[in-house]
Amino acid sequence: MNPSSNYKRNKIPMWINLINVIVVCILLFQMISAFVNPSWAYGTFENIDANRQAIFTLAGRNFVMIIATLFALKSQNVKFIFLIFIMNFTREFYDMVLVGYLDHFSIRGIGMMATFLVFLIPYIIAFKKLRQLAAKED
């Protein structure tokens, strides 16, 4: 292993890699639950064809996100990880709005939407750090 590859591996902060690992674990759990028992991750699930199609499509999306994130983690390429963060941020943001919408933006729904901030705030901080790192590469 040459010294430049060590530098490349060490430039992405560990906390950014850790966020990606946590997201992969969550997506993996959601993907597995979609096939085994959707209610584990998604609450009450009426087992009809339309619901199964939607949940399997969601599992496919999660599978693609897992693979892309693992490739980004392996590469430690700043721009690739930045792209993964954009994808995850938009996915989380969409899921956050969807939760509120499906609960008619009630107090409960807005409270559940607020829990998504646990992910969205670190993403925003990571965006700033990744942009700085990407600027150094250019």
Image (cartoon, grey):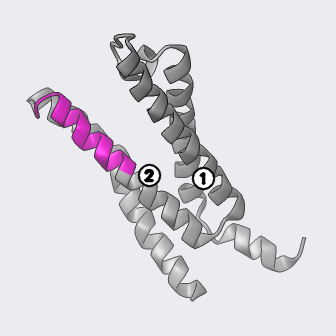
Query: Considering the image in quadrants, where does the N terminus appear?
Result: bottom right
Name the quadrant containing residue 51: top left
Vertical arrangement, residue 123 with respect to residue 130, above or below: above
Which residue of the protein is positioned furthest toward the front in this rendering? Answer: 49
The part of the chain drawn in magenta is 91-105
Tally of numbered discs: 2
Name the disc covering residue 68, or none: 1
Name the disc covering residue 6, or none: none
Vertical arrangement, residue 91 with respect to residue 40, above or below: below
The residue that disc 2 covers is 88
Callout 1: SS: helix
Residue at image position (70%, 63%) is: 75
Vertical arrangement, residue 52 with respect to residue 101, above or below: above
Callout 2: SS: helix
What is the CA distance from the residue labelled 2 to the residue labelled 1?
11 Å
Q: Nearer the viewer, residue 26 or 19?
A: 26
Query: Considering the image in quadrants, where does the C terminus appear?
Result: bottom right
Q: Position of residue 111 (x, y in %)?
A: 19, 34
Residue 101 is left or right of residue 43, and the answer is: left
Specify whether residue 114 is in view.
no
Say which amino acid is labelled 2. Answer: Asn
